[in-house]
Amino acid sequence: MNQVADILKLAIKAKQQGIDAVLATVVRTEGSAYRRAGAMMLICEDGRSVGMISGGCLEPHIIKRAFWLTRNGANVQVYQTGDDIKYADDGQAQAGARETKSDIYDEPDNGLDGGLDEADFDELNFGLGCNGRVHVLFERLTTATPLLETIRNVRRTQQPITVATLIRADDYQHQDSISQNSDNLQIGMRINLDEHRSLGSVSALGKTAFSSILANTIEELAEYKLFDKNTEYVTVENGEVTTEWLVQRLQPQLRLLICGAGNDVMPLVTMAKLQDWHVTVIDSRAQYATRMRFPQADVVMSLSLDDSETLLKLSNNAAVALMSHSLSQDRARLAVLLEHSNNYKYLGQLGPRYRTERLINEISINLSNPTMLEAGIHKLHYPIGYKLGGDGPEALALGIMAEINAVMHSQDAPVSGSHNNVSNIPAVSNDTDANIVQSGV
């Protein structure tokens, strides 16, 4: 399920077909939540929908209400996922068991047909037992298009962008002080914090100059660059106006480079694409590296063993899996990658430990200073993947993707059945007698 890719594709189709749609985005979570802030779902008026903002618990309700909720513009709703609703003897929901009107941002006009009545508010507590709250922004496709185009551009250029989305603005009763600039503060408006300009959403379409209130707010938000995380919920107090924002670092797709194009690579490609990764498969053997064999991969190419420049370009900020089942291929690729350990985020080598240590030994013999490999060796995972049990290429692929995901998201290895190569790294020696690998295992 390539959720972001599917949302982008459906948005283009809907626009081409003249079909309206609503983008639902999680902008804040409290307590336990299935999806994090930034998760999206696109609902078309013809019934099609892609993406998930929960584990399937909220989606039916959201699909039913999305167009009504956005009839007057962007709207934020809060959904409780606590305990079952408890009712007193008189049939009324007990205190604390129901969502209140104060928990609804931009409350719709109850006087209109289909307006929220008491039952509507009760339904906002879904009784899931998760004890969380999920804040969801609803906006029509015309409003959301600049964001989707920005996401598409991030994926194309591989350059992240920091975006702030307005999810609440209080103290609008003081209209005399901000009425002249109130159109700059609309729920759902977005600011590119890297360039201090609007993404073009809501009434800020095409505007480059902001009110003093918003300008000051942008300056404060610009401090949240989020280099170490992807989202931050930020409250900004500026004079008489308090605004709440989702500051989000839109990241490129995670990248996986697989060196080797054997049959056991196929399920690994599938698992990576299910998570919407960008996948490249290379092999020096042209008969293996074909589009017909790997239709799901983004890039499939035959790459000669002496093309180090292309290998480093493809591995830049990527996870790299060496699994060619060929000593000559693995030796050539590993020699380049071990010397450039800062180039990639993960490196794993398929095969038993003694095979990898043999490769390291053979590589180090040809170096005047074998210690230059040490940083790469400490970063190398071998044998590649977690030992999760099972047999066959699919079980192997599952273990590989589990380990890569853990490393890429800075998660600890499983307590049981795991291996920690860092604590048992072979030491590279530059003894004159022989450059050998001393294994700790």
Image: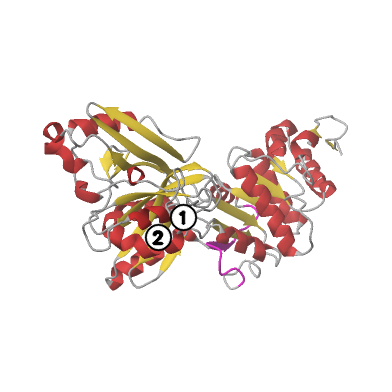
User: Dots 1 and 2: beta carbons under 8 Å?
Assistant: yes
Left or right, 260 with reference to 48? right
* Disc 2 target residue: 62
Q: Residues within 10 Å of mark 2 (few under 14, many from 20)?
A: some
**Residue 35 visible, this angle:** yes
Left or right, 362 with reference to 204? right
> What's the image's color scheme?
secondary structure
Q: Nearer the viewer, residue 57 or 429?
A: 57
The quadrant of the picture occupied by the C terminus is top right
SS state under label 2: helix
Q: Residue at x 76, y 39 (%)?
A: 420
Q: Position of residue 3 (x, y in %)?
A: 48, 60
222, above or below 363, in the image: above
Residue 330 — which label?
A: none
Q: Position of residue 285 (x, y in %)?
A: 67, 65
In the image, which residues are magenta? 293-306
Q: Earlier in the sequence, mark 1 or mark 2?
A: 1
SS state under label 1: loop
Residue 53 — which label?
A: 1
Q: Position of residue 439 (x, y in %)?
A: 85, 37
Q: Position of residue 64 (x, y in %)?
A: 37, 65
* Three-letter residue code for mark 1: Ile
